[in-house]
Amino acid sequence: MIEAKNISFRYGSRSALDGVSLKVEDGEFAAILGANGAGKSTLLKVMSGYLKPSPGEILINGCPASKMSPAKLAKERAVLEQESLLSSDYTVLETVLLGRYAFSPFAADDAEGRTIALAAIKSAGLEGFEDRLYTQLSGGEKRRVQLARAICQIGKDPCKKILFLDEPSAGLDPAHAHAAMAAAKKLSQNGCSIVAILHDANLAAEYADKIALLKSGEILAFGAPENIITAELMEKTYSARCEIIKNGKNKFVHFPKA
């Protein structure tokens, strides 16, 4: 379980978050939607412990994140950041094994760690990539490797763990975007709390249990997709005209040209 309690954050004189409260239970998949500059990545960084709120508090499984060491945090949660600066000539398997460092500095020689890493590689649709060099992959392939690294960090028992995803579908084709979301959904079904920043409202509606709409650093709405994915709320969130297209039991978000 991850809970943000009345958190705010500023970059100098600019307010990025203002009194945000958000709670994601064990096994719940929460998506965060919002326009560029709404504060989504800042919210994820604060909730995952990279940034400290002022004021406010983050609770991870009931424990204040401010009182947890970096090593303890690494065992409780994993983070897929928006960008990775990794440039070393590691293989895909070696890169994914970095997710086990908090549990074993010698993960490459740890049989259990390798088993977990190989399972994570499979879940990210990267079977057969194990010996390929990370630096020689496409942008989308690198994104999937980093997703596998985060899944590897969650480990074989995801219950009560937390996975933060900053734009997990960015740079991925539709098939791999759905595969990435399905991998995260499977973790949530096994007790892991998922907090994912997404730009695609349709992906959020399909996979998330709850959706938070963030605008100008504040939560505009938070709830089940059927209550959040409405033309009115989408227009308020993105300041753009929105249409909800119904197709049988499904509905799709469409932003027509102005």
Image: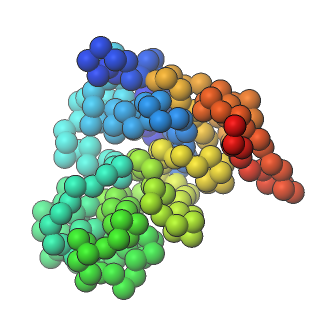
In this rendered view, identify the residue nearer to me: 38 or 210. 38
Residue 159 image position (x, y, % from top left):
44, 54
Viewer can see residue 219: yes
Q: Is residue 97 left or right of residue 199?
A: left
Name the residue rendered at 40%, 82% in the picture: 127
Question: Which image quadrant is residue 223 in?
Answer: top right
Name the residue rendered at 53%, 35% in the picture: 35
Question: Which image quadrant is residue 91 in?
Answer: bottom left
Q: How is the image coloured?
A: rainbow
In this rendered view, identify the residue nearer to me: 222 or 91. 91
> What is the number of callouts on the image?
0
Quadrant (top left, top right, bottom left, bottom right) of the C terminus: top right
In this rendered view, identify the residue nearer to me: 37 or 147. 37
Residue 141 sits above or below residue 241 on the image? below
Q: Is residue 172 left or right of residue 54?
A: right
Residue 41 image position (x, y, % from top left):
39, 38
Residue 242 image position (x, y, % from top left):
72, 38
Viewer can see residue 6: no
Name the residue rendered at 57%, 70% in the picture: 175
Name the residue rendered at 26%, 43% in the picture: 73
Residue 62 image position (x, y, % from top left):
39, 33
Residue 43 sits above or below residue 246 on the image? above
In this rendered view, identify the residue nearer to me: 177 or 5. 177
Question: Which image quadrant is residue 37 in?
Answer: top left
Residue 64 sits above or below residue 182 on the image? above
Q: Is residue 160 left or right of residue 146?
A: right
Residue 122 sits above or below residue 47 on the image? below
Residue that extends furthest to the right in the rendered view of this protein: 248
Residue that extends furthest to the left in the rendered view of this protein: 106
